[in-house]
Image (cartoon, grey):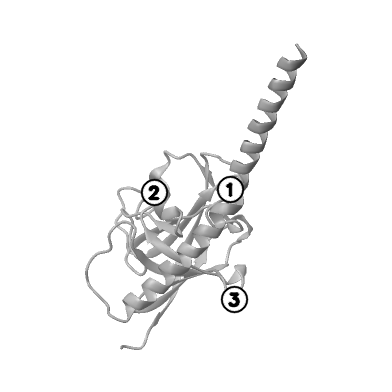
Amino acid sequence: MRGVVRGLGIVLLVAGLGLLGWVGWQYFGTGITSNSKMGEAENALREQWKKPSKTKAAEGDPVVLVRIPKFGKDWEKPVIEGVGKGELARGIGHYPQTAMPGEPGNFAIAGHRVTHGSPFRKLLELRKGDQVIVETADAIYTYELDGSPRDLTVKPADNWVLEPVPGKPRDTATKSIITLTTCQDLFHSPDRSVAFGQLVKVTKKPQR
């Protein structure tokens, strides 16, 4: 009996260590690889801008850069076309069915709060009036938030937040807005925290 108990204890110990290792990789290891991939995507995008193309971005392509001043002067992340696991492991994801920056409609993006570099870890700290700056090949777009992501939580099926005019599916978009989405909880949760913002400034970049 002692041998059985000892064997069971060893099995549980090994299983526990394996679980801790997996959790450690998810919360720390993926950040190392994802931060490296974000750097690569940012560099690739800046190189691409030197030779601009009118070809529409495919899923997995870096499309724009995002800066949120409240997160620090050095905070800058690439936005990748698509919101699948692969795209969100390389940066912030752009919902393909939504508008691009500056266009009439809703430029909607999503990012992790934990794992894979955690680009939106501090998103719920944002408040009304905080800025989100989006850089494209041709211009820099400044948006101001209407409220905090902390104040709006939706279910995964609540796609109204991605509509050109959120909550008004029959309306035609005339303004450019931004929508930020992330997990409500630091630990896995299907619910999403959401914030909307309005375009307040456009700065054209010098022509190359």
Rate crowding at label 1 as few (under 14), some (14 to 19) or many (20 or more) other CA atoms within 10 Å: some
- Quarter of the picture containing the C terminus is bottom left
Of callouts 1 and 2, the N-terminal one: 1
Can you identify the residue that label 2 sits on? 84
Q: Is residue 70 above or below residue 49?
A: above
Residue placed furthest toward the right: 2
Q: Nearer the viewer, residue 49 or 163?
A: 49
Of callouts 3 and 2, the N-terminal one: 3
Q: Secondary structure at mark 2?
A: loop
Can you identify the residue that label 3 sits on? 73
Residue lying at 62% horizontally and 37% vertically, measured from the top left: 18
Mark in the foreground, 1 or 2: 1
User: Looking at the image, do the residues carrying marks 1 and 2 touch, with CB atoms under 8 Å apart?
Assistant: no
Can you identify the residue that label 1 sits on? 25
Q: Quadrant of residue 5?
A: top right
Identify which amino acid the numbered label 1 is placed on.
Trp
How far is the residue under mark 3 from the one under mark 1? 28 Å
- Quarter of the picture containing the N terminus is top right
Residue placed furthest toward the front: 3
Identify which amino acid the numbered label 3 is placed on.
Lys
Residue 42 located left or right of residue 144? left
Residue 166 visible in image: no
Of callouts 3 and 1, the N-terminal one: 1
Q: Secondary structure at mark 3?
A: loop
Q: Quadrant of residue 62?
A: bottom left
Identify which amino acid the numbered label 2 is placed on.
Gly
